[in-house]
Amino acid sequence: MVRENEIRDGESAVALPPRYDAEVYFIGRIRTPWDSRLLTPRQGRADGPICHIEIFEPWVAALEGIGQFARLEVLYWLHLSRRDLVRQSPANDVTARGTFSLRSPVRPNPIGTQIVELVGVEGSFLTVRGMDCLDGTPLIDIKPDRTLFTPIAPPQPGDFETG
């Protein structure tokens, strides 16, 4: 079960730094059916419920052309997550692991990512399937799913050599 703020056996927390290194602009808000962390799915599903992403001004113009993509990568700020755990026991089985080896929302910088299916675009709203966050979650960014593109890389030594 998802927990709120307790530290389980084997877990450890650190003191957070006194200041932040960067600023993030929240460009919108995600609307989902979940209002409790205990009820929110751990991973989004392609057949999950319809959710809505609201884009704030002045970022609405950045949606131009987004409708041509079937899948989007959504980045969002897990605003209710702890940020101080460096070892976690997600299954509450006393087998703690480093935070960076987990997909837990509890992280130093609680950024969530999700690949979603784009169902529709209407004005400043996107309709999607596949979200896994709380209603009202702040939106950081939206990008076309990177797997829809052929990687572009500069030529590397040996690329054009024949045996």
Image (spheres, rainbow, N blue to C red):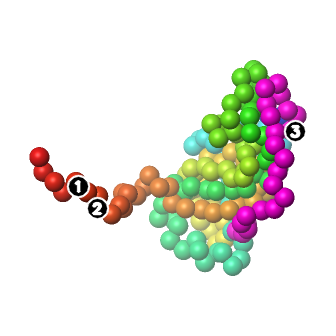
Q: How far apart are marks 1 and 3 (CA)?
A: 51 Å
Sequence order check, earlier mark of 1 and 3: 3
- Callout 1: helix, strand or loop? loop
Q: Where is residue 85 in the image (x, y as percent from the top left)?
A: 78, 40
Sequence order check, earlier mark of 3 and 2: 3
- Callout 3: helix, strand or loop? loop
Q: Where is residue 154 in the image (x, y as percent from the top left)?
A: 33, 63
Alpha-carbon neighbours of circle 1 within 10 Å: few (<14), some, or many (≥20)?
Answer: few
Which amino acid does the dot numbered 2 rest on?
Answer: Pro
- What residue lies at 69% left-to-right and 39% top-to-bottom? 99
Q: How far apart are marks 3 and 2 (CA)?
A: 49 Å
Question: Which residue in the protein does label 2 denote?
Answer: 155
Which amino acid does the dot numbered 1 rest on?
Answer: Asp
Front-most of residues 114 and 65: 114
- Visible residue check, residue 147: yes
In which quadrant of the rendered image does the N terminus lie? top right
- Callout 2: helix, strand or loop? loop
Span colored in magenta: 4-30
Q: Does the magenta stretch include residue 33?
A: no
Label at residue 5: 3
Left or right, 132 with respect to 71, comes to: right
Q: Where is residue 73 in the image (x, y as percent from the top left)?
A: 56, 55
Q: Is residue 29 magenta?
A: yes
**For residue 48, which quarter of the picture?**
top right
Label at residue 159: 1
Which amino acid does the dot numbered 3 rest on?
Answer: Asn
Residue at the far top: name it. 93
Q: How far apart are marks 1 and 2 (CA)?
A: 6 Å
**How many labels were placed on the picture?**
3
- What residue lies at 36% left-to-right and 61% top-to-bottom? 152
Q: Are the residues flagged by discs 1 and 2 in contact, CB closer than 8 Å?
A: yes
